[in-house]
């Protein structure tokens, strides 16, 4: 049977039925009924609001589940920091430079614990998945570090009014952005605890030795805004790489397991 | 609910871990049977959207699971083959943490946690830290976490590893009971895990899906290929060298061997009823699972 013949037969068959066209009210009622079942597309602001709420909720949960080691080590470093600031009160810029990235570096093992403890495969399948969990932990530790640095700056400015606010700000923002970025990059490539421990030791040793070299301390303290901004920009770039790695994070390179 | 796999392939370097798997899964228990390295875990990971196929698609009711994001994860329960735990968490805290990540409300989670802890027989270990649990107990916690959100798709990879026989039976019964209105995918190399509860068994070998059928039909395929042979002790090595030998049992009048063979292995050989362990041995030239 040809296509045209079939079309004709189907038309003839359908013509034997009479279908009443619905009236306006029936049309409206049908549309209203269906509309209730159609998912409404979120606006951009609604998406941002939902994601922000989710980040807050996840961050609070992660904060409450941080292990004692994080708080103990940070408490110890805070104490050490306060003693150092009193001991070397004539070198506030140097001291805050050295202390600035430490809370974050200490927190790396807490941020990376999903992968290090073998939980990542399971967490990748949860509603709030591994990437969201890791981002929340990053947010908590990063914010905690930021508050510590801001608090320490406030204390220094209170006890020593001669300190220049802008210089003090640069002294901690450069290591806070750049050094934490490099430390986290290292942790992504290796494991949280060794990366954390190695980087703390390395950072303290290198920065302490560096500031003992004649001229280097002076050079950093007198660093211009532009070079400092350049270093901060480099730090931001490292963080862009880190965030891209988090987004692609899977079960550790997805190796074949026989 | 319908999960459809179309020509799903996963390649690692020059190794095709999963090779062109095409099948369809609806509500009920599916047992993935295969030796180590057969591609079961890789396939499970792709079904859990942990890993993406190199080529091919996996869809749920026509929608690509990779694009469904948290809508897919929300209806998923997953127990990986190797699962770590946060050692300093108690059993209860661990489950509460996972429940929260699954988006369960606190009240609902509390009720569900109590119910599941009881179900996996860990009520007296509720406040015990995960680091202090035995391997079997950790596995039971793993099973409990997979069920927290009442998943529509439950994927469990070697779930009975480390469980004692009583717990394995309990787990099997549980799966059979909950499978009515959901898809349960269970991978194992232990035949008895799936023999009585699987709607269908999928046999994987070298990354390929070589059989998919009901246990009864699969067993039917090798009917008249399973033999019982009475032999002298000295003849046993020769049989083992030439045939796939399953059970070997010592009798009053010698040794009784269970042999899988296309042809009659001895004059006195008689055909015996086939079971799934024979089927496993037929496909995989290895020792039969417990």
Image (cartoon, rainbow, N blue to C red):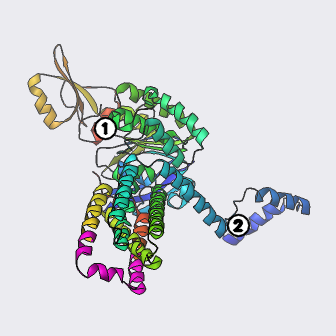
Viewer can see residue B57: no
Among the 4 quarters of the image, the one containing residue A197: bottom left
Relative horizontal placement of residue B134, taking residue B108 as reference (left or right): left
Identify the residue under disc 1.
Answer: B280
Q: Secondary structure at mark 2?
A: helix
Q: Is residue A240 above or below residue B63?
A: below
The dominant secondary structure in magenta is helix
- Disc 1: CA contacts within 10 A as few (<14), some (14-19) or many (>=20): many
- What's the distance in space between the residues labelled 2 and 1, CA to CA? 53 Å
- Along the line of sight, the residue nearer the viewer: B193 or A17: B193
Q: Pointers 2 and 1 in contact (CB under 8 A)?
A: no
- Along the line of sight, the residue nearer the viewer: B93 or B8: B93
Image location of residue A33, percent across then percent down: 80, 56
Image location of residue A213, percent across then percent down: 22, 77
- Disc 2: CA contacts within 10 A as few (<14), some (14-19) or many (>=20): few
Q: Residue at x 47, y 55 (%)?
A: A133
Residue B103 located within the stretch drawn in magenta:
no
Q: Secondary structure at mark 1?
A: helix
Q: Is residue B79 above or below residue A150?
A: above
Read off the magenta span.
A207-235
Residue A6's disc number: 2
Q: Residue at x 53, y 54 (%)?
A: A58
Residue B98's disc number: none
């Amino acid at each position: 049977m040809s296509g045209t013949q079939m079309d004709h037969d189907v038309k003839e068959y359908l013509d034997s039925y009479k279908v009443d066209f619905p009236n306006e009210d029936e049309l409206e009622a049908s549309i209203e009924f269906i509309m209730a079942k159609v998912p409404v597309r979120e606006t951009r602001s609604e998406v941002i609001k939902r994601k922000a709420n989710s980040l807050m909720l996840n961050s609070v949960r992660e904060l409450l589940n941080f292990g004692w080691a994080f708080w103990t080590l940070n408490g110890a470093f805070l104490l050490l920091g306060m003693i150092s600031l009193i001991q070397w009160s004539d070198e506030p810029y140097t001291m805050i430079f050295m202390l600035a990235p430490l809370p974050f570096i200490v927190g790396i093992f807490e941020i990376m614990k999903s992968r290090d403890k073998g939980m990542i495969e399971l967490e990748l399948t949860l509603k709030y998945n591994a990437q969201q969990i890791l981002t929340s932990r990053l947010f908590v530790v990063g914010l905690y570090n930021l508050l510590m640095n801001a608090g320490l700056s406030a204390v220094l400015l209170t006890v020593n009014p001669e300190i220049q606010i802008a210089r003090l700000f640069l002294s901690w923002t450069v290591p806070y952005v750049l050094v934490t970025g490099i430390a986290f990059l290292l942790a992504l490539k290796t494991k949280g605890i060794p990366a954390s421990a190695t980087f703390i030791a390395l950072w303290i040793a290198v920065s302490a030795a560096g500031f003992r070299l004649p001229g280097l301390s002076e050079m950093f303290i007198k660093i211009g805004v532009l070079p400092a901004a350049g270093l901060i920009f480099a730090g931001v770039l490292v963080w862009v790489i880190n965030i891209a790695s988090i987004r692609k994070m899977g079960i550790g390179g997805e190796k074949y397991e026989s | 609910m319908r999960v459809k796999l179309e020509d799903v392939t996963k390649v690692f370097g020059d190794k095709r871990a999963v090779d062109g798997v095409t099948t369809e899964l609806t509500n009920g228990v599916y047992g993935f049977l295969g030796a180590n390295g057969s591609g079961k875990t890789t396939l499970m990971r792709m079904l859990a959207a942990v890993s993406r196929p190199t080529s091919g698609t996996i869809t749920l009711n026509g929608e690509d699971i990779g694009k469904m994001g948290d809508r897919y994860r929300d209806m998923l329960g997953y127990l990986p083959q190797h699962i770590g735990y946060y050692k300093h968490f108690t059993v209860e805290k661990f489950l509460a943490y996972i429940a929260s990540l699954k988006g369960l409300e606190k009240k609902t989670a509390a009720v569900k946690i109590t119910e599941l802890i009881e179900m996996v027989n860990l009520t007296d270990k509720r406040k015990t830290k995960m680091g202090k649990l035995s391997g079997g107990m950790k596995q039971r916690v793993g099973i409990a976490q997979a069920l927290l959100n009442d998943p529509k798709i439950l994927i469990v990879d070697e779930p009975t590893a480390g469980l004692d026989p009583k717990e394995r039976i309990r787990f099997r019964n549980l799966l059979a009971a909950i499978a009515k209105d959901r898809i349960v995918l269970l991978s194992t190399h232990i035949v008895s895990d799936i023999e009585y509860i699987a709607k269908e068994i999928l046999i994987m070998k070298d990354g390929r899906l070589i059989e998919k059928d009901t246990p009864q039909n699969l067993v039917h395929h090798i009917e008249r290929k399973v033999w019982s042979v009475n032999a002298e002790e000295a003849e046993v090595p020769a049989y083992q060298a030439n045939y796939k030998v399953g059970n070997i049992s010592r009798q009053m009048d010698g040794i009784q061997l269970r042999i899988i063979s296309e042809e009659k292995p001895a004059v006195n050989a008689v055909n015996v009823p086939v079971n799934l362990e024979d089927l496993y041995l037929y496909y995989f030239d290895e020792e039969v699972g417990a």
